[in-house]
Amino acid sequence: MQQIRFDDSLRTGFAPIDEQHELFLGMLSELGAQIAAGEHRQGVLDAFQGMRLYADGHFTDEEALMAEAGYPELLPHCQLHETFRQMVGELEGRAGEGPGLLSLETLEFLGAWFIGHIQNEDQRFAAFARAGRPA
Ligand SMILES: [Fe+2]
Ligand SMILES: [Fe+2]
């Protein structure tokens, strides 16, 4: 599986956000390892649900931070979070219906989406928030 990994280039400078990003990417790669190892279905589904709930909580925290900072791009950012929530919700629903629907490719796709989102949208917010911080 392609590496899904947090590295320093993803740091926003906001420690709680960075910790959540790191933990979430860790959960995704752990889930990939479980699938690759042929872990039984319920274990994978439980881990997938845990990952979905964690992403949910992260998005809520991040949106609150943006609202507090008066971020003008809050709404489009929330829409991107919603896209991810929906993708993951649909995958979880489908995975609950039949075996073999959660593949490594799916996780790679989610990981690439999430990393791209950090690099672009989350970093854009971080730059905005840093600029507004008192020196
Ligand atoms: Fe984020
Ligand atoms: Fe975000």
Image (cartoon, helix red, strand yellow):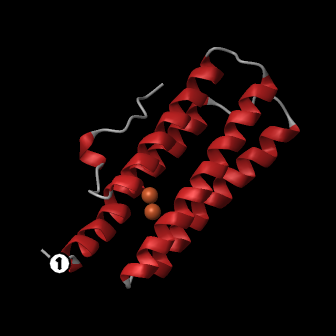
Task: Find residue 118 and report its image quarter.
Answer: bottom left
Q: Is residue 99 above or below residue 49?
A: above
Q: Is residue 119 left or right of residue 108?
A: left
- Relative depth, front residue between 114 and 20: 20
Residue at 85% in and 34% down = 98
The total number of labels drawn is 1
Q: Is residue 69 above or below residue 65?
A: below
Task: Find residue 105 and report its image quarter.
Answer: top right
Q: Is residue 92 left or right of residue 35?
A: right
**Residue 88: percent from the left, percent from the top?**
66, 51
Task: Find residue 82 and report its image quarter.
Answer: bottom right
The quarter of the rendering in which ligand 1 is drawn is bottom left
**Residue 77: percent from the left, percent from the top?**
46, 72
Q: Is residue 117 above or below residue 129?
A: above
Residue at 19% in and 76% down = 131
**Residue 59: percent from the left, percent from the top?**
54, 62
**Residue 80: percent from the left, percent from the top?**
52, 67
Q: Which residue is mark 1?
A: 134
Quadrant that contains the C terminus: bottom left
Residue at 75% in and 35% down = 46
